[in-house]
Image: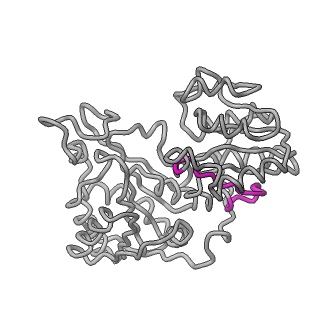
Amino acid sequence: MRALLIKTSSLGDVVHTLPALTDASRAIHGLQIDWLVEEAFAEIPSWHPAVTRVLPVAVRRWRKDLLNVRCDVAWKRLRAALDNQSYDLILDAQGLLKSAWLGWLADGPRAGLDRASAREALASLFYHKTYRVAKENHAVERTRHLFAQAFNYPLPTTRGSYGIARERVSTSRLEADKLMFLHGTTWASKHYPENYWIDLAKIARRNKFRVVLPWSNDQELERARRISRASEALVLDKLSLRDLAKELATAGACIAVDSGLGHMACALGVPTLSLYGPTKPALTSTYGDSQKALAVQFPCAPCLHRKCQYRDGPTAEAVCFDTLTPTRIWTELQWALSRQGPLALAAS
């Protein structure tokens, strides 16, 4: 059976799809998957052995210049690939109008979430067959449920497996004393206070750990440099997604805010403590073994606001993170660090 999977973005959403793909590949012998995904995240599907071909799309770029889409090299490659292949099933796991439109370009029966389940209800009009999936379930379980219905196999009762072939990501040895701080995220309200990162880095250094700071834009670089100057943490060079995955794969543990990189660390099997303020960990927290979501305890949390509304007027820094002190986070992280061998934890 050959199927086209459409899950274009974001980074966390792409990672959340991997366990469903593992379920399907175990249930259907010889399943071959082509995956339509945003070009920025095209590396991730290639890590899964069930993916035959990755088809990069550039919807984010195309929307900015609709008149010249037909001249875009990525568009020409996509159309050539789709024109030369028929599918037994086209599954839109995104549930958006843009992803439904991409499925419409391919040849084969289209399936996706029904009107009540899709993020954009009108997307369901593009499918030949639709399925209902409860919105209150975790994102990973929702996708597993959709796959089980669309490919017609019993939904597994065991925890999902990302199924990543680790050797496709990194062949380097684990560095048990390497602790990565995944401090970058999109919403202002999801940022953990910078002075708390500094205190955490100092605690980690006293405990004989090396703190490593990745970054992806100028704002994150400046934050990383300030944390480094105050705590002697290591600031990485700017890395591609592939090289960043290699760094993550060798880490002993990660502390992450709610971000795609936290989910990527989880998929790579890295023990990770994820910090949740304005968002709901029950729906989108890191999923898998050696993972722990730590949510704030605050009257208005989770508020789902991009900027903190608690004080007089929106602020860049969420007040609720005051309930997650560095000392508390270090205590919560000990379960993950203890998995890495006989490294002693000094008193914080």
Give the x, y percent position of residue 262: 46, 55
Residue 15 appears in the picture as rendered: no
Q: Nearer the viewer, residue 209 or 117?
A: 117
Specify whether 269 is left or right of 4.
Answer: left
Give the x, y percent position of residue 235: 35, 75
Specify whether 332 is left or right of 55.
Answer: left
Q: Nearer the viewer, residue 342 or 82?
A: 82
Seen at 68% across and 61% down, the residue is 46
- Residue 57 part of the magenta segment: yes
Above-or-below relation of 329 to 107: below
The answer to which image quadrant residue 106 occupies is top right
Seen at 32% across and 43% down, the residue is 277
Q: Nearer the viewer, residue 328 or 29?
A: 29
The answer to which image quadrant residue 5 occupies is top right
Above-or-below relation of 84 to 87: below
Q: Which residues are magenta?
A: 46-61
Q: How many marks?
A: 0
Q: Quadrant of the N terminus?
A: top right
